[in-house]
Image (tube, coloured by chain):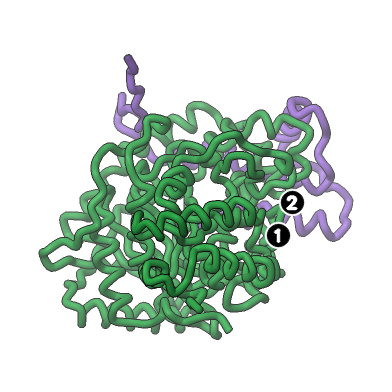
Chain colours: A green, B purple
C-alpha cells in the first residue's frame, strides 16, 4: 500500500503502474482525515462524496493512459477557497452557512488536472484579519501542530500545514497575506510556497487584502510544490491582478548568491535555531552557492503592511463587520480590531500605498544577491494554550518588504527544537520563483529534514 | 501570522488581560477615543462586551498611533500610490 507520506511523483507512478488506484488513495486519506486530521482540528469539511466521484473518474482516465502528474492525487484546500456546493466557511463561526455556487480558479485548475479534493482544511477565522491572539481563533478550534499536540499548527493556513505534514492529504493549498503559508509550513515541518503576488489567481479566494493576498501550495517537498504551482499558476481574466508572464521553474544555470541578513539569535535566546541556520548555510556553501552578507533598507515596511491589511480587510468584510454576526467570531480580539479597522483613514491608507512605491528601493538588494535566506521564526511552534503576545515574544525581528513588494518565498524545515520543526525560508525577487525552487530543491536533495515524520 | 504582528498585539492583550481579571472598567484617559468608540458602537448598532470594548479602544489607539507614526516617514512630493487602474474595453 502506498505510504500516506509518498511524494506526488511516487503516487503518480504507483497509479500508472496500477499498484494503487485513486479510489484507494482517496479512501486512505479520508480515513486519516477522519482520525488524525480531526484530532488535530485540521479539517473544516470532509468532501468524501465528491472525492470518491473524482477518484473514480481519475481511475477511468488512468486506465485509458490519460492525464498529467496530478491525476488521481488527493489534496486538501484551505477553507477560504470557494468550492461549488460545498460549505466555504472562512474559518469563521459567523459564516457557518456560507456556500458558493462556483469553484475558485485554483480549485478549478486542480479539478481539470484530475486532482481529488478530499477536504476543506481549517484556518484562522477570516485569515487572521484584524488581529488574533489565540490559537482557538477558528470555527474548528485550535489546530494542533503535526509533531506535537501541545503546540500550535500556525496560521492562518493551519489545517493545510498540519494535514500535509500528518500525511492526511497528498498536498494542500494555502494562502498568505502576511505569513499565512510560511508560518504553518515552518511549524509543521512542511514545505510551503508563497508565489509572486499575482502568480496564482485570487478569484474565488476570500479577500482579506486585495493587494497582498496570494494562493500557494503547502506540500512535503519543494518538488511537490513545483508540480502543484505549475498546475494552479497562470493569468485569469477573473483576477485582474494575475500575471500574464509565464512561470518558469527551470533552475538558473549560473551560480546563485544567497544573501544573509543580520540575525538576532542571542537577543531572542534562539541557540537551537542558530545551530540549524548555520548548518543550513554550511550546506548551501557545500552545494556551491555563494554566500554574501546583505542588508535591506531600514524602512517602515511592517507599519505600511499593517495599515494596508487593516483598511482593505475592513473594506472587504465591511458588511460582516457592521452586521450582527461579528460578535460570533471565536476571538474577541478579532471582533474588536476588525471593528476598529473601519476607522483607518483614507490618507493613512494612501500614505501606505505611496510608501509602497518608495519601498521598491528594497529591490536594490538583488544587485548583491539572487535570494535571501533567513529563519521563518526563531523558535518552533508555540504552546497551544498561551496567548501569542506572550508566546511569540522571542520569535524574531521585524517584517521586511517581502509581502509588500510581492516577493515569492519557499519555507522548508531546517532542523528541530525540542522535537518540534524549525523552518527556514528562501525569498526571491518578484517573478523569480525559479530561484526559490533551485535553492530549496538542492537543499532537500542534500538533507532529510523534510522527510522527518511525526510519530 | 508574522513576527511583526505581535508588536501590535502586545498592547491589546495587556488590556484584555486586565479586563479578564474582573477589574472595574478603568476610566478612559483619552476622551476623544471614547467618543470614537461610542460612534463605532453606534455604527455597528450594538455595544461591545466589556472585554471587546477594552480591546476595541486599544485597537483605535493603534489606528491613531499608526496614523502618527507614518508621518515620520516623509514621502516625495506628488509620489503616486502603488495602484493601477486598468481601463477595460
Give percent across and percent down for residue A338: 65, 40
Local SS, label 2: loop
Residue, x 44% and y 71% (percent of image)? A423
Q: Which residue is mark 2?
A: A330
Indicate the quadrant where residue A121 lies: bottom right
Q: Is residue B28 left or right of residue A191?
A: right
Residue drawn at the location 32% of the way across and 67% of the way down: A373
Residue A311 vs B27, above or below: the answer is above
Per the image, the residue denoted by label 1 is A136
In the image, A451 versus A339, the foreground residue is: A451
CB-based contact (under 8 Å), mark 2 and mark 1? yes
Q: Nearer the viewer, residue A195 or A171?
A: A171
- Among the two numbered marks 2 and 1 on one chain, the one whose residue lies closer to the N terminus: 1
- The structure residue drawn at horizontal position 38% and vertical position 82%, both measured from the top left corner, is A448
| Percent position of residue A263, x then y | 37, 70
Instruction: Name the foreground residue: A108 vs B30.
Output: A108
Callout 1: SS: loop
Amino acid at each position: 500500500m502506498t505510504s500516506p507520506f509518498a511524494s506526488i511523483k511516487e503516487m503518480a507512478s504507483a497509479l500508472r503502474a496500477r499498484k494503487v488506484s485513486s479510489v484507494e488513495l482517496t479512501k486512505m486519506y479520508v480515513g486519516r482525515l477522519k482520525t488524525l486530521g480531526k484530532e488535530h482540528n485540521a479539517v473544516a469539511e470532509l468532501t468524501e462524496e465528491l472525492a470518491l466521484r473524482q477518484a473514480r473518474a481519475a481511475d477511468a482516465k488512468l486506465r485509458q493512459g490519460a492525464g498529467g502528474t496530478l491525476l488521481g492525487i488527493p489534496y486538501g484546500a484551505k477553507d477560504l477557497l470557494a468550492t461549488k456546493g460545498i460549505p466555504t466557511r472562512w474559518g469563521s463561526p459567523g459564516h457557518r452557512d456560507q456556500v458558493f455556487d462556483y469553484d475558485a480558479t485554483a480549485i478549478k485548475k486542480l479539478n481539470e488536472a484530475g486532482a481529488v479534493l478530499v477536504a476543506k482544511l481549517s484556518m484562522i477565522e477570516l485569515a487572521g484579519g484584524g488581529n488574533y491572539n489565540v490559537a482557538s481563533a477558528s470555527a474548528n478550534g485550535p489546530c494542533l501542530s503535526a509533531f506535537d499536540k501541545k503546540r500550535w499548527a500556525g496560521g492562518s493556513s493551519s489545517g493545510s500545514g498540519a494535514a500535509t505534514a500528518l500525511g492526511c492529504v497528498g498536498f494542500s493549498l494555502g494562502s498568505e497575506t502576511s505569513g499565512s503559508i510560511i508560518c504553518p509550513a515552518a511549524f509543521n515541518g512542511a514545505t510551503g510556497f508563497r508565489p509572486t503576488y499575482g502568480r496564482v489567481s485570487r478569484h474565488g479566494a476570500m479577500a482579506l487584502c486585495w493587494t497582498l493576498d496570494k494562493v500557494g501550495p503547502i506540500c512535503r517537498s519543494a518538488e511537490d510544490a513545483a508540480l502543484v504551482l505549475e498546475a494552479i499558476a497562470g493569468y485569469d481574466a477573473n483576477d485582474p491582478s494575475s500575471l500574464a508572464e509565464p512561470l518558469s521553474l527551470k533552475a538558473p544555470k549560473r551560480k546563485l548568491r544567497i544573501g544573509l541578513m543580520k540575525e538576532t539569535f542571542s537577543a531572542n535566546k534562539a541557540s537551537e535555531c542558530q545551530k540549524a541556520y548555520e548548518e543550513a548555510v554550511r550546506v548551501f556553501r557545500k552545494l556551491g552557492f555563494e554566500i554574501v552578507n546583505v542588508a535591506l533598507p531600514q524602512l517602515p515596511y511592517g507599519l505600511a503592511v499593517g495599515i494596508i491589511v487593516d483598511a482593505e480587510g475592513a473594506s472587504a468584510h465591511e458588511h460582516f463587520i457592521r452586521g450582527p454576526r461579528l460578535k460570533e467570531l471565536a476571538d474577541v480580539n478579532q471582533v474588536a480590531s476588525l471593528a476598529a479597522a473601519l476607522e483607518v483613514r483614507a490618507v493613512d491608507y494612501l500614505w501606505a500605498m505611496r510608501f509602497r512605491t518608495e519601498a521598491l528601493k528594497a529591490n536594490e538588494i538583488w544587485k548583491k544577491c539572487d535570494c535571501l535566506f533567513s529563519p521563518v521564526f526563531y523558535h518552533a511552534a508555540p504552546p497551544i494554550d498561551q496567548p501569542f503576545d506572550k508566546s511569540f515574544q522571542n520569535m524574531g525581528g521585524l517584517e521586511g518588504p517581502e509581502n509588500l513588494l510581492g516577493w515569492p518565498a519557499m519555507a522548508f524545515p531546517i532542523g528541530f527544537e525540542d522535537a518540534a520543526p524549525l523552518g527556514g525560508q528562501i525569498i526571491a525577487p518578484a517573478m523569480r520563483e525559479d530561484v526559490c525552487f533551485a535553492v530549496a530543491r538542492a537543499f532537500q536533495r542534500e538533507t532529510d529534514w523534510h522527510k522527518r515524520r511525526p510519530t | 501570522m508574522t513576527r511583526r504582528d505581535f508588536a501590535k498585539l502586545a498592547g491589546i492583550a495587556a488590556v484584555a488581560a486586565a479586563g479578564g481579571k474582573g477589574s472595574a472598567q478603568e476610566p478612559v484617559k483619552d476622551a476623544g477615543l471614547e467618543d470614537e468608540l461610542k460612534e463605532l458602537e453606534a455604527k455597528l448598532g450594538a455595544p461591545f462586551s466589556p472585554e471587546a470594548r477594552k480591546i476595541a479602544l486599544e485597537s483605535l489607539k493603534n489606528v491613531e498611533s499608526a496614523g502618527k507614526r507614518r508621518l515620520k516617514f516623509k514621502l516625495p512630493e506628488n509620489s503616486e500610490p502603488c495602484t493601477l487602474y486598468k481601463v477595460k474595453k
